[in-house]
């Protein structure tokens, strides 16, 4: 079991990259002697390694800027399993402490949680068998799913997609596998992944908006995932964006999900007599002057932009990252979305929040799930 100081040191290097002992002591508010003792213990445990010499990042850390020995994570000192319940078959990945995926396996997806736990237990040895010592160094298992997850990352409070309510999935999987297990909402898992290993590593405050058949959202504030009192923070998909609008799977009407998700866009296009199966198809129709396609893209883009404007107005984040699974944001949909964002925030804030878009691959949710396990390993359970 790692101490709080040891976890703090590992987290500092994970966030900043290789650091000297002097830099680490300054970051953690410890004497260099105390820091050296912690570092020595972690080196003996095989969790840290010295990377040779390099110019120090802090001028005050070495006299006259002399090169200093830096400490870096030993990426294969701990492994993490990530599983996505958003796809069938469900992907399973094995990642190291730097977030690199080093092995893959898949399993049949079920809606029965007991069967899921059994399937994970059956497939886990096959995944771990692809990497030497993976079983001995396995330090956590994460599961990403669509739905509400409690503040302890243990119970699925509700998932419309899976048909679950109050399912203690983490306990069920841990009982079957013997591996400490955490579950998390898919968008929140992606946000943690981006903070630990991705494009938001140096951004203390940001929001992720995940655009697919559903819409997910998560906020990182002061470098930590913000989950709210009950784990439900960031659920913009079910914010009312069109009062009295179309029925939503959640039981309400006019939710953002019913207007701006890829599923909603396809359904609106079909209702207009268009045979478009993707955002790219619809963009092509709109570029050709098809009024129905233009109307659908305007409605969806404006709704998503309004929702993002509300995030900016409430949280004032340093970045909004939009992840999407198809098409691009270079066409009408993205243009209308951006216009709606700027039209619905105070003029003082218009244009000040970078909006980044990134097309994601099929690994994103499983990688995010593994990141949830890695995050708990680095900072300790239930403190994120």
Image (tube, rainbow, N blue to C red):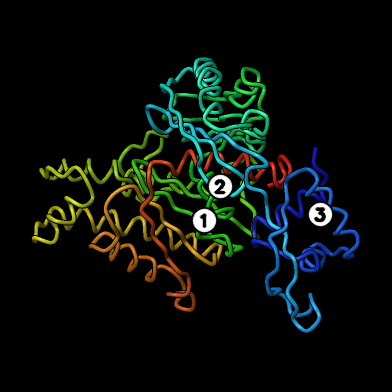
Q: Where is mark 2, residue-wise? A: 99
Q: In the rendered image of this protein, does residue 167 appear above or below residue 251?
A: above
Q: Residue at x 59, y 49 (%)?
A: 98
The percent coordinates of residue 118 (x first, y second) are: 53, 16
Label 2: which secondary element: loop
Q: In the image shown, does 145 or 24 lie closer to the viewer?
A: 24
Q: In the rendered image of this protein, does residue 380 appear above or below residue 348?
A: above
Marks 2/1 in contact by CB < 8 Å: the verdict is yes
Label 1: which secondary element: loop
Write down the quadrant of residue 46 in the picture.
Answer: top right
2 or 1: mark nearer the eye: 2
Q: Residue at x 57, y 23 (%)?
A: 167
Furthest residue in direction front, as rendered: 52
Label whose residue precedes the other's in the sequence (1 or 3): 3
Say few, some or many: other residues with alpha carbon within 10 Å of mark 3 (under 14 / 14 to 19 / 20 or more).
many
2 or 3: mark nearer the eye: 3
| Quadrant location, the N terminus | top right
Q: Where is mark 3, residue-wise? A: 39
Q: In the rendered image of this protein, does residue 107 appear above or below residue 190?
A: above
Q: Report the Cα–Cα distance between label 1 and label 3.
A: 25 Å
Q: In the image shown, does 306 or 132 lie closer to the viewer?
A: 132
Q: Report the Cα–Cα distance between label 2 and label 1.
A: 9 Å
Label 3: which secondary element: helix
Q: Report the Cα–Cα distance between label 2 and label 3.
A: 22 Å
Query: How many numbered discs?
Result: 3
Q: In the rendered image of this protein, does residue 301 appear above or below residue 165?
A: below
Q: Which mark identifies residue 212?
A: none
Label whose residue precedes the other's in the sequence (2 or 3): 3
Write down the quadrant of residue 78 in the picture.
Answer: top right
Label whose residue precedes the other's in the sequence (2 or 1): 2
């Amino acid at each position: 079991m790692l101490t709080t100081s040891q976890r703090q040191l590992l987290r500092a290097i994970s966030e900043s990259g290789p650091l000297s002992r002097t830099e680490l002591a300054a970051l953690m508010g410890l004497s260099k002697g105390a820091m050296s003792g912690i570092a020595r213990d972690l080196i003996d445990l095989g969790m840290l390694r010295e990377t040779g010499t390099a110019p120090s990042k802090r001028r005050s850390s070495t006299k006259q800027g002399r090169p200093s020995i830096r400490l870096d994570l030993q990426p294969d000192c701990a492994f993490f399993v990530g599983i996505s319940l958003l796809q069938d078959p469900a992907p399973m990945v094995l990642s190291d402490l730097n977030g690199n995926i080093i092995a893959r396996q898949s399993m049949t997806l079920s809606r029965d949680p007991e069967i899921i736990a059994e399937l994970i237990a059956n497939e886990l040895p096959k995944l771990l068998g692809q990497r030497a010592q993976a079983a001995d160094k396995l330090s956590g298992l994460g599961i990403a799913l669509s739905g509400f997850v409690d503040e302890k990352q243990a119970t699925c409070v509700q998932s419309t997609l899976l048909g679950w309510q109050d399912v203690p999935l983490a306990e069920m999987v841990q009982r079957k596998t013997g591996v400490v297990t955490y579950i998390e909402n898919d968008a929140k898992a992606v946000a943690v992944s981006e903070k630990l290993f991705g494009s938001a590593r140096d951004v203390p405050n940001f929001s992720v908006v995940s655009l697919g058949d559903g819409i997910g959202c998560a906020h990182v504030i002061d470098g930590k995932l913000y989950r709210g009192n009950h784990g439900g923070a960031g659920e913009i998909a079910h914010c009312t964006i069109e009062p009295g609008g179309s029925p939503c799977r959640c039981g309400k009407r006019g939710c953002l999900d019913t207007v701006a998700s890829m599923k909603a866009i396809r359904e609106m296009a079909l209702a207009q007599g268009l045979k478009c199966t993707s955002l790219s198809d619809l963009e092509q129709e709109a570029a050709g002057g098809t009024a129905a396609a233009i109307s659908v893209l305007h409605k969806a883009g404006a709704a998503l932009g309004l929702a993002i404007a509300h995030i900016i107005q409430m949280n004032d984040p340093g970045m909004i990252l939009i992840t999407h699974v198809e098409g691009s944001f270079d066409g009408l949909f993205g243009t209308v979305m951006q216009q709606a964002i700027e039209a619905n925030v105070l003029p003082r804030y218009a244009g000040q929040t970078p909006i980044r878009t990134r097309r994601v691959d099929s690994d994103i949710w499983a990688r995010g799930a593994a990141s949830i396990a890695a995050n708990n390993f680095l900072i300790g359970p239930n403190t994120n």
